[in-house]
Image: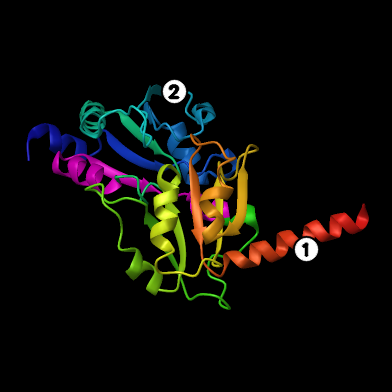
Amino acid sequence: MNDASVCVMHGGGAVVLLSAGPGDLELLTLKAVKALAAAQVLLLDDLVNPDIVQFAPQARVIRVGKRGGCRSTPQDFICRLMRRYALQGANVVRAKGGEALLFGRAGEEIAFLRASGVQVRIVNGVSAGFAAAAGLGMSLTHRDHCHGITFVTAHTQDHGEPDWAALCATRTTLAIYMGMGRIAALTAALLRHLPGATPAAVVQSASLPQQAQVLTTLERLAADVEGLGIGAPGVILIGGAVGEAQVQAFAQSHAMQAIA
């Protein structure tokens, strides 16, 4: 290990991989707010609420946008940027949307920084899947319907598809990330392994005032989400537990009609 790396590991700069949550700033943890207050350099992901900068008054803000289907800052460049500032002795915060350890390429960044002798800390947060379930008023692991939850991205590193047959066989609630751009193909693949009547939902911009949601069935999912904004990030939820949200929504609608 070189002298610069030894310096960093013994009180110099460091990098915090900070989970900024689904968008509602009130869902930030106290630890996240403290880390932001101490930040000297703040690398801001495109999916992070831009108002988060109010908690980092001392920081130089660098926007490193990364969003599927859009022009993004190269991952290698982001890694080198974090290393450079940390080796200069700065407190660097890399703010990621949702939970940093879930589909955020945190593993690559942790390995790169540690190999460079840079200390890394991780601050957990609320993933969009949990915020989506909260917005629907449902449990992801309702024991009448499933025994677990599976978080999965809609595409693999080599741009292929997950093993949908194996995932459906788990009989868990499926929380599918980064699937809005290929929802027609995704639902067609799932329909080869699940009944068309399987409850399904999509929640976009979970936790935010502009949250949009659709409760439907797997066979109608692709058609029913056509009215939602294509560019907004969304979580797709599939499984029997989603049916509880449908029951609740129907009951609320019925009650409102009765009052009217």
Residue 224 visible in the current orientation: yes
Dot placed on the residue nearer the N-terminal end, 1 or 2:
2
Residue segment shown in magenta = 106-132
Residue displayed at 32% across by 45% down: 121
Q: Is residue 128 magenta?
A: yes
Q: Is residue 118 magenta?
A: yes
Q: Residue 19, located in which quarter of the rendered image?
A: top left
Q: Which residue is mark 1?
A: 251
Q: What amino acid type should be assigned to the residue bearing mark 2?
A: Gln
Looking at the image, residue 76 sits to the left or right of residue 106; the answer is left
Label 2 element class:
loop
Q: Which mark is residue 58?
A: 2
Across and down, in percent, residue 68 comes to 37, 37
Across and down, in percent, residue 109 comes to 25, 42
Compute the Cα span from label 1 to label 2. 49 Å
Q: Quadrant of the N terminus?
A: top left
The answer to whether 199 is drawn above or below residue 171 in the figure is above
Looking at the image, residue 138 sits to the left or right of residue 67; the answer is right
Across and down, in percent, residue 159 comes to 26, 47
Q: What amino acid type should be assigned to the residue bearing mark 1?
A: Ala
Q: Residues within 10 Å of mark 1 (few under 14, many from 20)?
A: few
